[in-house]
Image (cartoon, rainbow, N blue to C red):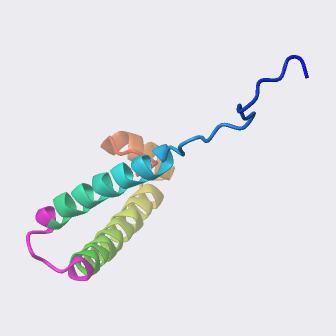
């Protein structure tokens, strides 16, 4: 049997590497650090309370903005201008 060496095996044992586990562990560590940083920014306040306060403030802001838009509309009608013209006259954005 030429070309064949006795005692040698064609299969080699490969030690599995775990780079995905290492990168997953690194990602978990990064996320834990980010979560700790965000908790520190809350300053001990409950996250749900912060969210509810922001929702209330946004609601108030939207009510004020709607009122201002009604006043702008009334002014535009009285002065026979378009709302766009009034916004330009007052230096207001049409997209906000």
Residue drawn at point x = 45 percent, y = 47 percent: 94
Nearest to the observer: residue 27 or residue 94:
27
Q: Relative to residue 41, is residue 51 drawn left or right?
A: right
Q: What stretch is highlighted in magenta?
A: 40-49
Prevailing secondary structure of the magenta residues: helix
Expressed as whole percent of the image width and height from the top left, the position of residue 24 reads 43, 53
Q: In this view, does 95 lie above or below 14?
A: below
Q: Relative to residue 74, is residue 45 drawn left or right?
A: left
Expressed as whole percent of the image width and height from the top left, the position of residue 46 reads 18, 80
Residue drawn at point x = 71 percent, y = 33 percent: 7
Q: Relative to residue 12, is residue 59 drawn left or right?
A: left
Nearest to the observer: residue 51 or residue 28:
28
Total numbered labels:
0
**For residue 47: magenta?**
yes
Whether residue 75 is visible, yes or no, is yes
Whether residue 81 is visible, yes or no, is no
Residue drawn at point x = 65 percent, y = 37 percent: 12
Is the N terminus in the top left, top right, bottom left or bottom right quadrant? top right
Expressed as whole percent of the image width and height from the top left, the position of residue 72 reads 38, 59
Expressed as whole percent of the image width and height from the top left, the position of residue 36 reads 19, 62
Q: Relative to residue 19, is residue 50 drawn left or right?
A: left
Q: In this view, does 48 lie above or below 64?
A: below
Residue 68 sits in quarter: bottom left
**For residue 7: magenta?**
no
Residue drawn at point x = 44 percent, y = 62 percent: 73
Nearest to the observer: residue 78 or residue 36:
36
């Amino acid at each position: 049997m030429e070309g064949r060496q006795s005692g040698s095996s064609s299969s080699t044992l490969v030690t599995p590497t775990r780079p995905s586990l290492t990168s997953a562990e690194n990602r978990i560590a990064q996320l834990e650090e980010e979560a700790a940083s965000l908790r520190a920014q809350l300053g001990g306040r409950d996250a749900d309370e912060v969210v509810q306060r922001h929702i209330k403030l946004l609601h108030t802001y939207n009510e004020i903005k709607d009122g201002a838009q009604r006043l702008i509309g009334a002014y535009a009608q009285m002065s026979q201008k378009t709302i766009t013209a009034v916004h330009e006259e007052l230096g207001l954005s049409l997209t906000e």
